[in-house]
Amino acid sequence: MGSYIETELIINHKDTELRLGLPGSDDEQSCNGGSIVRSNKRSFSPETSVEEESISKSSGDSNSTTTSDRDHDQDSVQPTKVQVVGWPPIRSFRKNSLQQNKVEDGNGMYVKVSMAGAPYLRKIDLKVYKSYSELLKVLENMFKCTFGEYSEREGYNGSEYAPTYEDKDGDWMLVGDVPWNMFISSCKRLKIVKGSEAKGLACL
Amino acid sequence: MQQQQKVAALSYSFPEEVLEHVFSFIDSTKDRGSISLVCKSWYEIERWCRRRVFVGNCYAITPAMVIKRFPKVRSITLKGKPHFADFNLVPEGWGGYVCPWIKAMAVAFPCLEEIKLKRMVISDDCLDLIAKSFKNFKVLVLISCEGFTTDGLASIAANCRNLRELDLRESEVEDICGHWLSHFPDSYTSLVSLNISCLANEVNFPALERLVSRCPNMHTLRLNRAAPLDKLANLLRGAPQLVELGTGAYTSEMRPEVFTNLAAAFSGCKQMKGLSGFWDVLPSYLPAVYPVCSRLTSLNLSYATIQSPDLIKLVGQCQSLQRLWVLDYIEDAGLDMLAASCKDLRELRVFPSDPFGLEANVALTEQGLVSVSEGCPKLHSVLYFCRQMTNAALNTIARNRPNMTRFRLCIIEPRTPDYLTLQSLDSGFGAIVEHCKDLQRLSLSGLLTDRVFEHIGTYAKKLEMLSVAFAGDSDLGLHHVLSGCDNLRKLEIRDCPFGDKALLANAAKLETMRSLWMSSCSVSYGACKLLGQKLPRLNVEVIDERGPPNLRPDSNPVEKLYIYRTISGPRLDMPGYVWTMEDDSAYLE
């Protein structure tokens, strides 16, 4: 191997160094070329105060401080993170499998919702919801009805109404029996039925 | 003089057949290589009786060269694209085409029995050629391959009368028709191993059932996600001798008889040692596998989106476990249980359930890995995705497990420091390389300076593969690795401030390695040209989607760089965004 003179390497590290540090620390953040990592991230450790740090591409930017509107945005909208290509290092096959479990952005998954006696049908986007409780709450509001407590054995026992859905095979099923992800992939339409009708379904 | 004559007489008096017989016990490629270097006659004898060839880089040598040296090959393994292709860092159409190999071997190796490919492109025509050229074809393994459809599989099924193994692990297959499986003739009974877990659509299930039940030596069966759970029990009853099973989606409508059938079927599988699959798990169905848990040595739950309590219940029954792949839903609590129950554990992989989320969605920290390193004395292979780490934890892990051979840590956020001290993780990884003297493979993450590379260069003498991302400060880092790691074969680097100096100073080292990948670093086009010129036994490939690098100044850094040693000169199948740096000798020939 060639001999290597270390003194040649007196490069100004500060210009190229990119570190994570608490706001107010000496290190100034600067660009490190290559691919961008940009995130709005709370520091994890519970000891430090919760502050958001962001790593900016343009050199000379000092740490940005928490933006207050980010806080309440967290509740309603997933803050998006600019993804670095190929990071974290997960194979496509695995990534795709994971994503099939998740609600993706993009085209919604609209299904018709009907209720006997209602003058018209509604449509909702199943992909917006992450769980049965969310979905049921929305349906209760939309149709001004209540479903009871769900149990595997009794269905929605003791309630005036119950949610049902038509699955891929064309069968009418009680909402809540199968895992959420399986439900949204097989649900073709929803129908809110009277409690007495639903009892028949729950007895299977 | 007399001594020499005696030795010469001895070696000539040893019949070739005897030597050949002795060599037949030697299977490892490395040992075979050593044998061939002893003397000319051993080289000759060895090459005529070599049956297995391993080509780690399909561009390092031409098919003709392999065929010329080893005329009687029965099994060939070929690898194509660089490892970082798995993470979409290699653009489409880069290469790795197996066709020229298949065409050449179809003529030269009529007795070929095994083809194993990794990260290569194989077409339906190629599969057809394989199916029709090799009468005794037995094993086809396609790992992370692409370029073919189920029509190609149909040809294999229809023509390979002696096929024993068909493994399509993680390949991208265009799924045209699930009926390809029906092309196995009714008279065909020799299937031992089938892995179709990557197929997107349902296969013809009755055909699969018939196939499985008429192959008495079936040992491994890995279904795809679309395979329905309620049909699994029947399938298992037809093959109770299965040793490795990959389920399909592990969910079904709640029907009690599905569960009882399944549990009964698993009870009948007395040989079962490995389970995988488990997409979309319905936790209430998990107890169906309890009958086989105590014998399981391998469990892949890395697609199972079930929570810690269910995972703990399951894994707690698997005391014989040697290999566990799982999602981070297992959490520290689950890893504590693993450490306490599975004393034979050798390999652990923990994958992230929410890799692109901003915050931790599970209670999995460095502590889980520390626990397992403490409780499992045979643990030597680790892949761990997490969001926080400390030098103290890495230090503990290193001291607990000096027998570690493969250690891959991925802290999800790049450049994350030790969360307690806010320092770099140099000393933690330093401890790993210092204490784990047999470390062969290492992947780094977190905040790292040049110091970590100094440690690696100093201690990691057995290291063969190193993966680096978002680390280091200067060329000194790369220099430490290239000058210190004596056994380095594969080095892959992304997003590090490494430039020309270290590469040029250690240019000769590159000829002792299989390959070097650098992307989003600071290596200039000029340096690439220089390397290409001076080292004719290397292919220096510049990958740059911005257009020809000679349209930009020499000092401009290239996007990606792939350097590999080769005896076949520059390849001729490059796409428009890859340029091979010419060597001076090209003009001398």
Image (cartoon, coloured by chain):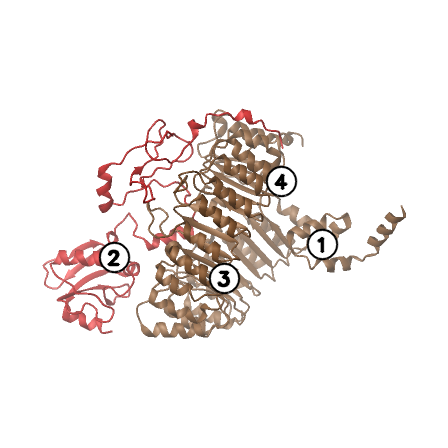
Q: Which residue is identified by label 4?
A: B512
- Whether residue B82 is visible here, answered yes or no, is no
**Do callouts 4 and 3 mark residues in contact (Cβ within 8 Å)?**
no
Lower position in the chain sequence, tag 1 or tag 4: 1
Instruction: Specify few, some or many for label 2: CA neighbours under 10 Å numbering under 14, 14-19, or 20 or more.
Output: some
Under tag 4, what secondary structure?
helix
Q: Which residue is mark 1?
A: B48
Residue type, mark 3 in image: Lys
Q: Can you identify the residue that label 3 sits on?
A: B343
Chain in red colour: A
Please say if B132 is above or below A4.
Answer: below
Question: Picture coordinates of residue B96 (x, y %)?
Answer: 53, 45
Callout 1 amino acid: Trp
Type of residue at label 4?
Thr
Residue B438 in view = yes
Work out whether B81 lies above or below A162: above
Q: Residue placed at 26% from the left, 54% from the top?
A: A130
Tag in front: 1 or 4: 4
Q: Give the residue at x 44% y 52%.
A: B369
Q: Colour of chain B?
A: brown
Q: Say which of B549 and B160 sits in front.
A: B549
Q: Secondary structure at mark 2?
A: loop
